[in-house]
Amino acid sequence: MAHPITRRCVFYVAGFDPSGPAQHHRLYTQEAAQQAAVSGYTISVSTRKNTAEHLAQWSIEHRSASPLGSAPIHTDYVFARWDDIVRAHWGKLDSWAHVLQFAISFFATQWHYLRTGALWAMLRLAWPPVVALVAPLALLLGSACVWLMAVSAAWGSITWTLGVGTLAGLGLWLLIQRLEAKFHMLWLMRSYMFTRLCAMGRVPAVDERVHVFATAIAQARASGRYDEVLVVGHSSGCILAASAAARSLPLMAKSSALLTAPLGLVTLGHCIPLLSSLPAAQGCRDDLRSIAESGAVRWVDFTAPSDGSCFAFVDPIAAAWPGKSESENQNQNQSQSTPTLLSPRFQTLMSPEQYRALCKNRFDLHFQYIHAGSIAGEYDFYALTTGPQSLCERFADAHSVTDFTKFRLFG
């Protein structure tokens, strides 16, 4: 018999995003209302308040359409803040000095991933996110080559050389602007560079913040107030979410609470190999190992193959130890917990016209995990975080997608 959910606590960790809880609260309120209207339940979201230095919270009441008169499910939704760290490492481009500093950091990041073999390791897992990471470099080098060829073709006359060089440069700049508007390459580059710094231990604030999150998670589980505690991460926030969940486990072992709420982990559009593939990121791999060996975390991962910014259907735990053979991983999975790898199937949650339009904007597609659909379906972010079913119950019969090899190279 399923344990009824009456109170839940959700810890949400956003990706590499400089916007804070105010924007996410507005988005959650708006999208929850749209999804509720489509899916046939009612949902109300309270105002936002700060409960701790790095935690913002709002309350949610979810009432199912049937049975009539059912009691509402109460959710305390906690926005785990690290937007201040993101802003500190955003890398402004408001002067030539800042542009030069940004470029040096970007080239250093590309070289670091290439030199350590991390780029090759990620390429074997899934090529679309790797293409997204190296595309800016290819675009810059290609643009430089085109400009040089245009100038070389006009060489001999100062007037022609300057004119052709200016026109070619302007054309390439407009092209780059259009591509940036569609793919948000600068955002990806900033996240890419930041991840390298984290692996090298040059952003100690991240570990300190993860400890804050882990402590809050453990306290919520031990409080006796909740039937379930969920940790939800999106994009690069999945890295922090997984680490916070892992580091909360030893804190629970020290707790004197007799009853603790079960812990669930939900990752959306994850890019965990971006960090775990780097040799220096031992802390990340240790956290993933802790989750696997504990058997105490129910982990459900959602990735969409059409989302080129995530590692679609890549098990982040198995990917952290690529040297093991497949048989070794299978034997290990029999005794350890691993994520259930699922697809949100965005194409079933909207009309064909809406889906085609969504696929034209890769940035919007990467954020669709936390947006409402126009058609009710199996994937429902707002029912998942506020509804009457626990994570275990909702996905009790779900089976991981294990036969998707479209994006894997060399095995």
Image (cartoon, rainbow, N blue to C red):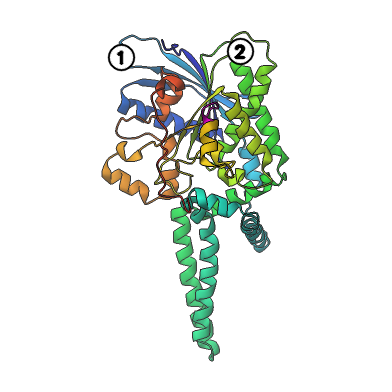
Residue 33 image position (x, y, % from top left): 38, 27
Residue 187 image position (x, y, % from top left): 54, 50
| Mark 1 crowd level (few <14, some 14–19, many ≥20, 10 Å Cα) | few
Q: Residue furthest bottom?
A: 156
The magenta stretch is 333-338
What residue would you read off at disc 1?
Answer: 66
Answer with mark 1 or mark 2, whichever residue precedes in sequence.
1
Residue 307: tell me if it is visible: yes
Q: Nearer the viewer, residue 109 or 367?
A: 109
On screen, residue 86 versus residue 309, left or right, reads: right
For residue 332, which quarter of the picture?
A: top right
What residue would you read off at disc 2?
Answer: 223
Distance in Å between CA atoms under marks 1 and 2? 30 Å
User: As displayed, is residue 103 above or below residue 226?
Assistant: below
Q: Which residue appears at 45% of the width and 11% of the height?
A: 3
Q: Which amino acid does label 1 sit on?
A: Ser
Q: In which quarter of the image is the N terminus?
A: top left
| Mark 2 crowd level (few <14, some 14–19, many ≥20, 10 Å Cα) | some
Residue 397 counted in the magenta span: no
